[in-house]
Image: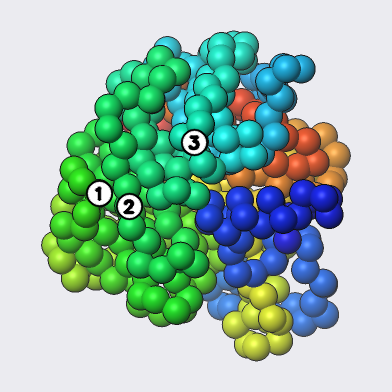
Amino acid sequence: MSPMNLAALGRGLLVFVVGGMLLPGCLPYSCQPQPNEALYPSDSLSRQVAEETPADTLERRWQTTGTEGHALAHPRTVRFVQEGGLAVSDVERNSLFRFGADGRLLREVEDAGFRTPYLIGARADTLIVFNAESNRIDRVVDGRRVGLPVSYERPAPETLVYMLATDTTMYAKVVGQNTDSFVARLGANAQPTARAPLRGPHWRYAGFLRAWGDTLVSLSGFRPTVDLLRRGFRNEATPDSLALVGFNSPMLERRYAFGQGDATEAPLLSPAAAPVGDTLFVLNLRPGWVQIDAYDRRGRLQRRLVGRNEETNPNFYPLDLDARRTEDGYVFAVTIRSPEARLKVLEWRPESPGSAGGR
């Protein structure tokens, strides 16, 4: 699915399986073109809405590949931390990178306990890390693991697990082809205290968990839809589905073909999203540039934010997104796997302060 040489294939598949990256479906622009140009009515409406929605330019602040001795290899997750800095987890190097607000590498945190680390939250000066290969949750402060780790037991080895740590609570989304899919609220020992089932084909729910105020957002990489749950949901709660009206992609025709049984794999439309205030920023995959779509609480597209097109490249593959409000706009951090592993930081300054939600 993702570009890798044959020598790295074995390790890459392990990383993808346990880390939740080997998702059913094809990556954008890796699918064969479909002659059928039919769309779902909802996608046709979204395409029209997108064409009528203003587009603004994302300006690049800086980007980095790391340093010669500490180069990014597979920067899987990213989070803003204190003082505008950034933390990045690298699932190939099994390490954490810390960058200053100016892009300078402060340190690479290496630890024998890291096994395919995912950043799942930040609490003050503490990073919360889920090691997907060992199912262990660690806390990291000043470059060191602190306290006793806890473990989360997967229902089955092949299930995908997406975790989230808020200021007070941890959550897990479990997606499995041969097991039930669900979102669980976890206690201090990482045991479920409440569970909300996710009904339907498992591939519909493949995607990160994010916190949007008092609501959990369950992302779907293959559908222009998110599922919403109150953070204090009761056992057996039913998530609400929110369609992203205005989501437009060159792969929508492929999505329709898959739904009609005319394609064997669903296309990946979006790998990540980041809520800020009343706005949900969604990373919209495009061949060679970063595009971020801004949606309001009703799921309606408000702005299309487009990075400057450096070059069209079908192997361009961003992985994760985080966003933060600034005094005059927003700043975004995007991790990119290929054609070159790097971290890119962009900013958007709306013409009117109220054109997207505040914090």
Circle 1: is it few (<14), some (14-19), or many (20+) Cα within 10 Å? Answer: some
Q: Is residue 358 above or below residue 317?
A: above
As drawn, the residue found furthest toward the bottom would be: 261
118 relative to 53 in the view: left or right:
left
Q: Which residue is mark 3?
A: 114
The local crowd at label 3, few if under 14, some if 14 to 19, many if 20 or more residues have their Cα within 10 Å, is many
Relative to 4, 269 lies left or right: left
N-term mark: 2 or 3? 3
The image quadrant that residue 149 belongs to is top left
The answer to which of 80 and 227 lies nearer the viewer is 80
Q: Nearer the viewer, residue 125 or 285?
A: 125
- What x and y, as percent, mark residue 92? 64, 39
Instruction: Determine whether label 1 and label 3 are within 8 Å by CB.
Output: no
Which residue is found at the position 85% from the left and 39% from the top? Answer: 311
Residue position marked by numbered label 2 in the rendering = 152
Residue placed most toward the observer, 352 or 126: 126
Tell me the element at label 2: loop
On screen, residue 104 versus residue 147, left or right, reads right
How far separated are the C-alphas under marks 1 and 3?
18 Å
- Residue 322 % position (x, y): 49, 35
Residue at (62, 55) in percent of width and height: 14
Q: Which residue is mark 1?
A: 190
Q: Secondary structure at mark 1?
A: loop
Image marks 1 and 2: residues in contact by CB distance under 8 Å: yes
Label located before the other in sequence (1 or 3):
3
Q: Evaluate whether residue 198 shows in this view.
A: yes
Taking the image as shown, residue 352 lies to the left or right of residue 276, namely right
Q: Please name the residue shown 61% across and 27% down the image.
A: 346
From this view, report whether residue 252 is shown above or below residue 161: below
- Residue type, mark 3 in image: Phe
